[in-house]
């Protein structure tokens, strides 16, 4: 789809700021804004469970993640747990992202921290607040990236409370 | 095991400078935080960041100079934690191209 016609922006400055053009309603007299296509090169999605081929489950709300994986040219999945294909096949309707879209899979336990990953862990509000209060200088950023590197790269165990292991992952 | 299983470092290397990258999740929920941090460590540049409601991931990549352009809607830490400080600073300085998609 090169564009999508939408209603509801009449009176807003956004269409002009974003350079949106209009299309005529072929069935009536209305002029509708046509939002241009935005195709990402990549979608990067964090999930609780994926298999090694990139089939992935999302528990709870999927937000826009399904759309992103269909719209992007390629997808990277980072997963709390790598599960077997049989585990996903037992309830195939729960597979939100099928493997054909996925280029790479990363085993990333705690990879959503300081955010939540339902149903495994909640938001770490203390850490998120500390980040928000952190000065924006390069030294603070370097420290933040250095401190988190061992865990992110799997060199130490995830520092999050796992309340649900959820799978037959080996 | 499949050839698709790679390390976080290897996966982040797949993203080219100036790529258009959509990030999953919403605000402080189920977003690829470790992946965003790895892109920052690798010094990726010129990324066009896409997400309807970004939080920490977007701010971190603004802070690290990874993002040059953004197509975003609401961008905030939410939950009483306030605005995204680095995003705000860069937007106010005018060194970030922002397209608001409310």
Image: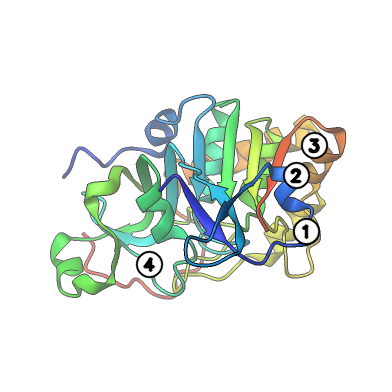
In front here: A37 or B25?
Answer: A37
- Mark 2 secondary-structure assignment: helix
Badge 1 marks a residue whose secondary structure is loop
Q: Mark 4 sits on what residue?
A: A58
Write down the residue under mark 1: A12
Disc 3 from disc 1: Cα separation? 24 Å
| Residue B58 as seen in the image, left or right of residue A23 | right
The span from disc 1 to disc 2 (Cα, nearest Å) is 9 Å
Q: Residues within 10 Å of mark 1 (few under 14, many from 20)?
A: few
- Using the image, tell me which numbered label, if any, was put on residue B90: 3
Give the percent coordinates (x, y) of residue A128: 69, 58
SS of the residue at dot 4?
Answer: loop
User: Label 4 marks which chain's residue?
Assistant: A
Instruction: Kindly indicate the quadrant of the structure image that contains residue B86.
Output: top right
Q: Which chain carries label 3?
A: B
Q: State left or right for residue B17 relative to residue A48.
A: right
- Residue A136 seen in render: no
Task: For label 3, count other residues whose C-alpha is less than 10 Å away and answer few (under 14), some (14-19) or many (20+).
Answer: some
Q: Do the residues labelled 2 and 4 touch (CB within 8 Å)?
A: no
Label 1 vs 2, first from the N-terminus: 1
- Name the image quarter holding residue B44: top right
Query: How far apart, in angstroms, are the residues tagged by discs 2 and 3?
Result: 19 Å
């Amino acid at each position: 789809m090169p564009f999508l016609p939408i209603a509801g922006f009449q009176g807003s400055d956004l269409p002009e700021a974003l350079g949106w053009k209009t299309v005529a309603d072929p069935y009536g007299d209305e002029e509708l804004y046509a939002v241009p296509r935005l195709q990402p090169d990549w979608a990067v999605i964090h999930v609780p469970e994926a298999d090694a081929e990139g089939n992935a489950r999302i528990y709870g709300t999927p937000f826009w993640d399904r759309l992103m994986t269909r719209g992007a040219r390629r997808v990277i999945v980072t997963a709390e747990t790598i599960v077997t294909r049989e585990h996903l096949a037992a309830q195939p309707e729960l597979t939100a992202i099928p493997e054909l879209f996925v280029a790479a899979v990363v085993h990333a336990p705690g990879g959503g921290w300081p955010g939540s990953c339902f149903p495994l862990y909640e938001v770490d509000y203390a850490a998120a607040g500390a980040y928000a209060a952190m000065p924006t200088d390069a030294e603070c950023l370097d420290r933040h990236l250095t401190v988190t590197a061992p865990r992110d790269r799997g060199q130490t165990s995830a520092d999050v409370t796992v309340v649900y292991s959820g799978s037959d992952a080996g | 095991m499949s050839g698709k299983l790679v390390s976080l470092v290897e996966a982040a290397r797949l993203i080219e400078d100036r790529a258009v990258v959509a990030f999953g999740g919403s605000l402080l929920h189920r977003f690829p935080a470790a992946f965003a941090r790895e892109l920052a460590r690798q010094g990726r540049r010129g990324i066009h960041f896409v997400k309807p409601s970004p939080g920490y991931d977007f701010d971190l990549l603004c802070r690290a100079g990874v993002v040059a352009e953004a197509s975003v809607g609401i961008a905030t830490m939410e939950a009483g934690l306030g605005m995204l400080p680095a995003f705000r600073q860069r937007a106010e300085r005018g060194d970030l191209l922002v397209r608001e998609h409310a």
